[in-house]
Amino acid sequence: DIQMTQSPSSLSASVGDRVTITCRASQSISDFLNWYQQKPGKAPRLLIYAASNLQRGVPSRFSGRGYGTEFTLTITSLQPEDFATYYCQQSYSPPTWTFGQGTKVEIK
Amino acid sequence: QVQLVQSGAEVRKPGSSVKVSCKASGDSSSKYILTWVRQAPGQGLEWVGGVIPLLGTKKYAQNFQGRATIITDGSTNTAYLELSSLRSDDTAVYYCARERSTCDGTICYKTFDYWGQGTLVTVSS
């Protein structure tokens, strides 16, 4: 099975900061990589698909890049509503899906 | 607007079974493919199982082989997840999610674009 590893596991940042989260796959997954945001008590929300494509309705301060085994999610100018946990997910081998362990973005 | 509505919270004893439902509505032009993901308290997301669309067969994560059964009812756009031989570590919120394909030429990218509200299953003696 493909393993997904995110770093860091958590980070503290201030409103207005630029934040970058990294996700690494245990084998090449091309650009079959999705990012989700989850707030406490809520279901995950799709942010980015195919490594760099913004889901409709997602603010443009979110961006993704990467190919193969290394990927990043960047939030430019962090907003109060962005404090949440972020998960990467490989979609290279459906219907077997793997998520990263999550990165919690907290207020400094 | 697509909506996935799940059944309510359940409490079960170890060794018993539970069946959670997920009813999809709102986009009659799409054929729903629903998958299941769970999240233990304070933990990350774990894929439980889903459907292989072209074959109509189900596939399950290794951790759930032999214990999980996914049933789909196309006439009502409802999916069910049944989990048997419950253990205390099966205590989790179980989510259904709609699998969607977005194609760029011959390459199709799959995502979970809509999610249910989650069903808390508590396993306790």
Image (cartoon, rainbow, N blue to C red):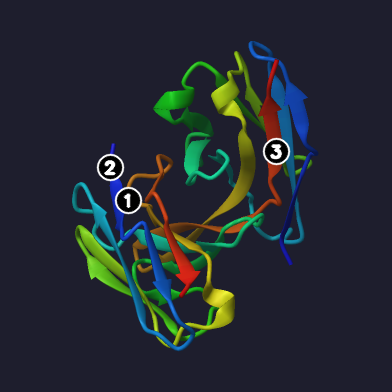
Q: Nearer the viewer, residue B39 or B7?
A: B39
Number of numbered tags placed on the structure image: 3
Quadrant of image for the N terminus of chain A:
top left
The residue carrying mark 1 is A92
Disc nearest the viewer among 1 and 3: 3
Few, some or many C-alpha atoms within 10 Å of disc 1 (few <14, some 14-19, many ≥20)?
A: some
Q: Which mark is residue B71?
A: none
- Residue B105 at what x, y percent from top left? 35, 68
Q: Chain of mark 3?
A: B
Horizontal arrangement in the rendering, residue B83 relative to residue A91 (left or right): right
CA–CA distance in space, label 1 to label 3: 29 Å
Q: Is residue A93 above or below residue A103?
A: above
Specify whether residue A103 is in view. Answer: yes
The secondary structure type at the circle numbered 3 is strand
CA–CA distance in space, label 3 to label 2: 28 Å
> What residue sits 49% from the left and 46% below the top?
B45
Few, some or many C-alpha atoms within 10 Å of disc 2 (few <14, some 14-19, many ≥20)?
A: some
> What residue sits 40% from the left and 39% below the top?
A96
C-beta proximity under 8 Å, tags 1 and 2:
yes
Can you name the residue that lies furthest to the top here? B15
Disc nearest the viewer among 3 and 2: 3
Q: Is residue B17 above or below residue B75?
A: above
Q: Which mark is residue A2?
A: 2
- Residue B24 at what x, y percent from top left? 73, 50
Amino acid on which disc 3 is placed: Leu
Horizontal arrangement in the rendering, residue A93 relative to residue A48 (left or right): left
Q: Chain of mark 1?
A: A
Horizontal arrangement in the rendering, residue A70 relative to residue B4 (left or right): left
The residue carrying mark 3 is B120
Few, some or many C-alpha atoms within 10 Å of disc 3 (few <14, some 14-19, many ≥20)?
A: many
> What residue sits 54% from the left and 26% below the top?
B89
